[in-house]
Amino acid sequence: RVTWISKMSDLSGDDTKTGNKLLGLKQDDYDVLVMAASAIGLSILYNLLQESMFTSDAKKYTALITMMTSLVYAVLALGEFYHEIHANHKAKEAHGGVDESSSPPTVLGSMKGTAFDYARLGTLTAAGMYFTNWSLQYLNYTLRVLFKASKIIPTVMIAVFLYKKSFTTREYVNILVLVASIVLFSYGDAAGKGKTGNATFDVFGIVLITVGVIADALTSNFEGEHLFKVRKASHSEVMMAASLFGSMYMLAIMVASGKFWDSYTYTMENPDLAVKVVVSCSAGYFSITFILKIIKKVGAVTAEIVKSVRRVVSIVLSFLIYSKPFLSWHLIGSVFFLLFIYQTFLAKVAKTKAKEAARRAKAAIDLENLGTKKNTPGH
C-alpha cells in the first residue's frame, strides 16, 4: 500500500515551502502531518459511509456487502501488487540484478503464497467480515469499532497457546481494561435500546461479532506466522489473494442460500449501495496506506497516536450524526477505552525504546569486537 502513495507524498516538496514557513514546520514534519490528517479523514469517511449502509435496509444483505467489499479490496490490492513487482523488477535491472532482455514479471508468477494458503486465509477473512457485518443487524455501529479494537484479545490468546509467545502483566491488564470498556458500552446500548431509531441491541449480535473477531485474530496470526515470516509474501499479495477467495466464497453462499437474484435485484434498484461500498472501502484501504507510510517514516508510536485519534473521532461522530442515546454507561466505557488507548501508546513507546537500546548495545558490541580484531597480532 505504501508504493501507491509515495508519489502523492513527494508532491509536497516545492509546492508546500511557503506553507511550511507559515506553519513553522520542517519538511518531514509537514509530510507526517499531511499523512496523519489524510489517514484520519479517510478513516472517518470510511466509518460514516459504512454506518450509513448498516442503518439502512442494505444491512439485510450481509453476503452481498461482504462480497462487494472483498472485490474492491482485491482490485485495489491487485493494482498495488502489480506496481510493486514491476518497480522491484526495474530496480533490479538498474543494478544489473536481472537481464534486460528478460520478460517482465507476472502477477501469478510473482506470488509467494500457494493457492491452498489463500484458500484457507480467504475463509478466515471472509468469515471475519461476514459475521461482523451480520452482527450490525443487531448492534450499534459504535460497538463494531470497539470490538475491532478487541481483536487483540483472541490474538494474544492464540499467540500464547499456539505460538508459545509471552506477554507482560501490563499488557494483560490493558486487555482487561478494554474488556471493561466493551462491557460498559454494551450495557449502555442495552439500556438505551429503543430510545431512538438507531438505538439497537441484541445479545445475538454480541455472539456474531465475537465469532467475527476470533476469525480476524486467526487471520492475523496466520498471516504473520506463515505468509509473512515463512512465505515472505507482501501485504498487497496477501490482501489481493485473500480478498479474491473471500468474494468467491460469498458468491457461493448467496447462490447456495437462494439469495443471489434477490441481492442482484436490490443492487440494481439501489445503485448507491455499490457507490458507498467502493468509496468507503477505497477510503479505508488508503487510510491504512497512510498509516503504513507513517510507520515507515517515523515509527510505530506516531502511527499508534493517529490510529487512536481516528477511533475516538469515529465514535464521537457516530453518536452525534446518527442520534443514539449517550448514557452514563457509555461515558464510563469511554473513559476505560481512552485508558486502553493511553496504555497501548505507552506500551508502544516502551517497545520502541527497548528496540533502540538493543540496537545500540549490538552496535557497541560489534564496534568492540572490531577493535579487538585490529589489536590481535596478524590482523
Image: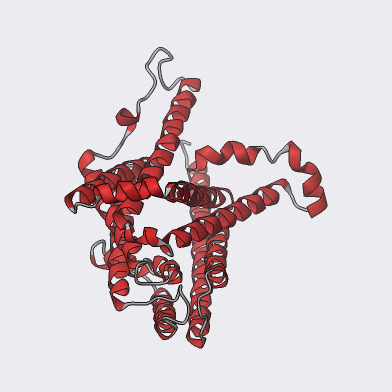
Front one among 286 and 113: 286
Residue 155 in which image quadrant: bottom left
Q: Along the horizontal axis of the image, is 315 left or right of 147?
A: right
- Picture coordinates of residue 228, whole percent (x, y): 34, 47
Q: Residue at x 38, y 76 (%)?
A: 172
Identity of the residue furthest to the left in this view: 256
Identity of the residue furthest to the top in this view: 101
Residue 26 vertical placement versus 355 (above, below): above
Q: Residue at x 30, y 28 (%)?
A: 109
Residue 166 vertical placement versus 220 (above, below): below
Q: Is residue 340 visible?
A: yes
The coloring applied to the image is secondary structure
Residue 114 in which image quadrant: top left
Residue 53 in which image quadrant: bottom left
Number of marks: 0
- Picture coordinates of residue 112, whole percent (x, y): 30, 37
- Picture coordinates of residue 148, whole percent (x, y): 40, 65
- Picture coordinates of residue 162, whole percent (x, y): 23, 63
Front one among 23 and 172: 23
Q: Is residue 120 visible?
A: no
Front one among 15 and 363: 15
